[in-house]
Amino acid sequence: MVASSSAAAPLAVSCAQTNNKRAREQKAKRHGVTRLDSMYDYIIVGAGSAGSVVAARLSEDPASSVLVLEGGPSDDLPEIAMPAATPTLWSGPLTWDNATVPQQQAAQRVIPWPSGRTLGGSSSINGMIYMRGNKIDYDNWRDFYGCAGWGYLDILPYFIRAEDQQRGASAYHGAGGPLHVEDQKYQHPLSRMWLEAAIASGLPYNEDFNGDHQDGVGPYQMTQRDGRRWSTADAYLRPAMQRPNLTVETDAYVAELILDRDRASGFRYLRNGAVREAHASREIIVALGAVKTPQLLMLSGIGSADQLRSLRIPVVVDSPSVGVGLQDHPMVLTGWRTPSVRNLWEEITPRPCTFGSARGAVQWRRLAPISEALAAASAIAWHQICSSAPSLGLRRSPSSVRPRNERSALSWAQSRCGAVDA
């Protein structure tokens, strides 16, 4: 969605801007807009994994003004930084509580599909696994779907540029980039046993799933920094927020695109109980993820004409491909009890609960089991079945999803050990 400014005489531009502003004010009044925001060069909707990066890159030009609208709150909740608290983030104020329609191949079950609703988006609530995907997938996009420039060797330099790899730079990894990637600071005994068993069964050990090949078994690397979650908000957005030309508004729920004839020029959104508008002179970027991006387009009248009419949404652009073709990977969960080995939740409770100081509490959190990503796998195995690419992934978690009858991992630890500083 691009809004381009035209080159014209100064007087003509001035008159056009005045007329456009009056037209916007009149249209805004009809939509109940109580505040008409200033014009920006760029407006980004969504401060998630993509939006944070785009905001940081565009605001590098001090002559460009950039506005970021994020529908959720700030990312200052202590649980976000604590890897083991990840499952407590999958419902509540930091997520869009998406769910699928009843799935025919899953006994008509409705599957929860949460996505991040805070600065950093899903990178602030996910399992922190650093996994780029298989190179064959990228090459297939290029070769079979016409996505020029999206082959693996085309995008590898960008992965390297983004990365700050704990192990140092190599042919597949970078050092000094904004995104910290490191080995897990703690590995649960059950995870180590599982790795040993997988290797004993004949699977080759693989210390780097983002290197030359992916098949094999080994521990994941994480997007963490010193045992703490390192989201795209940490890596990109917060450093950029120091720039005077970048404005970030949280709790800004975008309701629809503002369309001037056949061109998108801004957004209409709700913040602090007021309906507002923001306009862009150059470009708007919709970065709301795989679910919310097509939803916003459809709410704005861009989508399948038949479907929009059935929902009584005025059709602006008949684009049947909007909102279809989504694919996801299935995951089947199995569990075993290990009475002789303490699980992760049991190990999280320190013995004895004496930190001695706030500094000691922080050190414990970063070095003890709470730095392990509970929801993420501690190891993975790929098995090739009549294919040139891996066809099966195995993940292992050393505990159940979350302790029962507890609000969160933070409150759980605090109830046993006193306050823990964030």
Image (cartoon, rainbow, N blue to C red):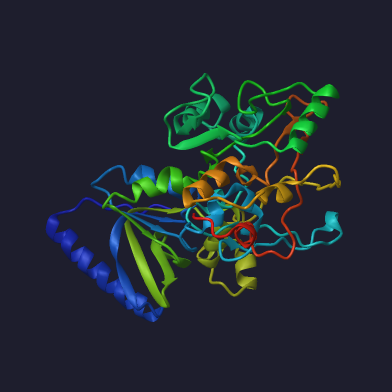
Above or below, 181 against 18 in this view is above
In this view, the residue in front, 77 or 383, is 77
Drawn side of residue 333 relative to residue 20, left or right: right
Drawn side of residue 149 relative to residue 194, left or right: left
Residue 371 location, quadrant: top right
Residue at figure coordinates x 21%, y 50% from the top left = 7
Q: Position of residue 4 (x, y in %)?
A: 32, 52
Above or below, 134 against 255 in this view is above
Residue 187 location, quadrant: top right
Above or below, 302 against 311 in this view is above
Residue at figure coordinates x 44%, y 30% from the top left = 161
Query: Does any portion of residue 11 appear in the rendered image?
Result: yes
Q: Position of residue 159 (x, y in %)?
A: 50, 31
Drawn side of residue 307 relative to residue 260, left or right: right
Residue at figure coordinates x 28%, y 61% from the top left = 39
In this view, the residue in front, 133 or 316, is 133
